[in-house]
Amino acid sequence: MPVKIRLQRHGKKGKPFYWVVAADARSKRDGRYLEKLGTYNPNADPAIVDINIDNAVSWLEKGAQPTDTARTLLSYKGAMLKYHLNGGIRKGALTQEEADKKLAAWLEEKDAKIQAKKDGLTQAEADARAKRLADEKAVSDKRLADAAAQEAEAQAAEAAEAAAEEAPATESSEATEEAPATEEAPAAEASEVTEEAPAAEASEATEEAPAAEASEEASEEKEG
C-alpha cells in the first residue's frame, strides 16, 4: 500500500488550517488517514508548524513519500535531516551520538533564526505603531492649528467690521457738532451789523444837529 505524507485541510473559509497526515495515496485528500503527524497554521507570522519528528521519520523509513509542501514542512522542522542522519548511521558513516549532536545543533540554530524573525516582527510592529501614533498626532496638531488660525481670522474680520461701523458714526457726530457753529456765525455778524448801524446813524445825527443850530443862530444875527 503506497503511503503519502500530505496536508489535510481544516479550518474556516479564508482561514485554512492543515493537518500533516500519513494516508493511503488512493484516499481522498480530506478523507481517512493512517496517522496524524502534526499541524500547520499559515495564518500566523511566522507560520506555526508542529510535527512529531520521530513518527514522521518512521513513516519515511517505511517508504512514505511526502508531497512537495509536506516535504518543505518536514525539512523546516528537521525531520528530513534526521531521516538522512539515520541513513548515515545505518551505513556506518555516523554514530548515533554524532547524529544526535548534529541534529541538536541544527535545531538550536533553526530556533534562533525563528526567534530572531519573531523579534524582528515584534520590533517592526512596535515601529509601525509608533509611526502610526506620530502620524495621528501630526494630523491632530495640524487640525488644531488650522482651527486656531480660522478662529483668529474670524476675530480679525469681526474687529474690522466693528471698526468700519464705528467710523461713520464718529464722522456723523463730528459733523453734527460743527454744524451749529457754522450757522451761528451769520447771526453774530448780523448782530454786529445791527448794533453798528444805529450807532453810526446816531453819530451822524449828533454831528448834524449842532451844525443846524449854528446855522440858525447865524441867520438870526444877520436879521437883527
Image: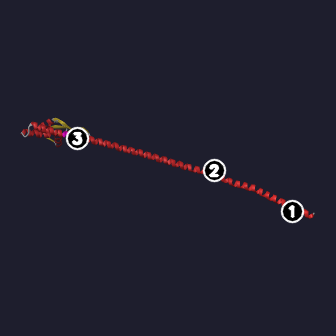
Q: Is residue 199 visible?
A: yes
Where residue 6 appears, as percent x and y from the top left, is: 17, 40
Q: Is residue 2 visible?
A: no
Q: Indicate the quadrant containing the N terminus: top left, top right, bottom left or bottom right.
A: top left
Which residue is disc 3 drawn over? 116
Which residue is disc 2 drawn over? 177
User: Does dot 3 land on a helix, a strand or a loop?
Assistant: helix
How would you rate the neighbour count of disc 2 (Cα within 10 Å): few for under 14, some for 14-19, many for 20 or more?
few
Q: Quadrant of residue 130?
A: top left
Q: Coloring scheme of the render?
A: secondary structure
What distance separates the C-alpha of mark 3 from that of mark 1? 148 Å
Residue 215's label in the rendered image is: 1
Q: Quadrant of residue 120?
A: top left
Q: Is residue 86 magenta?
A: no
Frontmost of labels 3 and 1 is 1
Where residue 148 appears, as percent x and y from the top left, is: 44, 45
The residues colored magenta run 110-116
Q: In this picture, is 91 found above or below 203?
A: above
Please name the amino acid that badge 1 sits on. Answer: Ser
User: Does dot 2 land on a helix, a strand or a loop?
Assistant: helix
Frontmost of labels 1 and 2 is 1
